[in-house]
Amino acid sequence: MADATAQKTPAAAAAPVAAAASVAEPAAPETPKIKPKKTTQRACDEKDAKGKLCCGHLKRWYDYPKEIVALVGPKAEIYRCEFCKTLYRPDFSKPPHSYTLRY
């Protein structure tokens, strides 16, 4: 009787490992989401799958990789959320409040 349970335990333990190995496939890098930034927006307004707001601080991103340059153009003004990494473009329809950003 002890031999029968000993034989079932390793087989049962091996089944979830095999299932987990088949699920873990290399995922292709997805393109980041690019949204327009509102005039006075300073925090991310992206929602996750549960509907919860990210509220991460939007920081100016200066040194972005070549993949992002292909999407937004060279030397573009881009902001990125510190948590979910969503990209934001500034809204050029209204002038910025900061005098240093007016050109």
Image: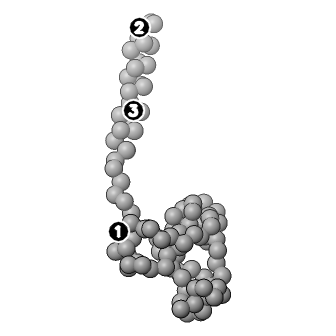
Residue ID at (42%, 25%)? 13
Q: Which residue is mark 1?
A: 66
Q: Which residue is mark 2?
A: 3
Task: Look at the picture and state if 46 lies above or below 95.
Answer: above
Which numbered disc flags the more N-terminal residue, 1 or 2? 2
Which numbered disc flags the more N-terminal residue, 3 or 2? 2
Picture coordinates of residue 39, whole percent (x, y): 62, 85
Q: Is residue 62 left or right of residue 52?
A: left
Which numbered disc flags the more N-terminal residue, 1 or 3? 3
Q: Does the rendering let one see residue 19?
A: yes
Picture coordinates of residue 87, whole percent (x, y): 50, 71
Picture coordinates of residue 81, whole percent (x, y): 56, 66
Image marks 1 and 3: residues in contact by CB distance under 8 Å:
no
Q: Give whichever of 74, 8 is nearer the camera.
A: 74
Q: Nearer the viewer, mark 3 or mark 2?
A: 3
Q: Does the rendering let one see residue 51?
A: no
Its colouring scheme is: one colour
Image marks 1 and 2: residues in contact by CB distance under 8 Å:
no
Residue ID at (39%, 70%)? 68
Question: Which quarter of the image is occupied by the N terminus?
Answer: top left
Q: Which residue is mark 3?
A: 17
Task: Look at the picture and state if 96 lies above or below 53.
Answer: below
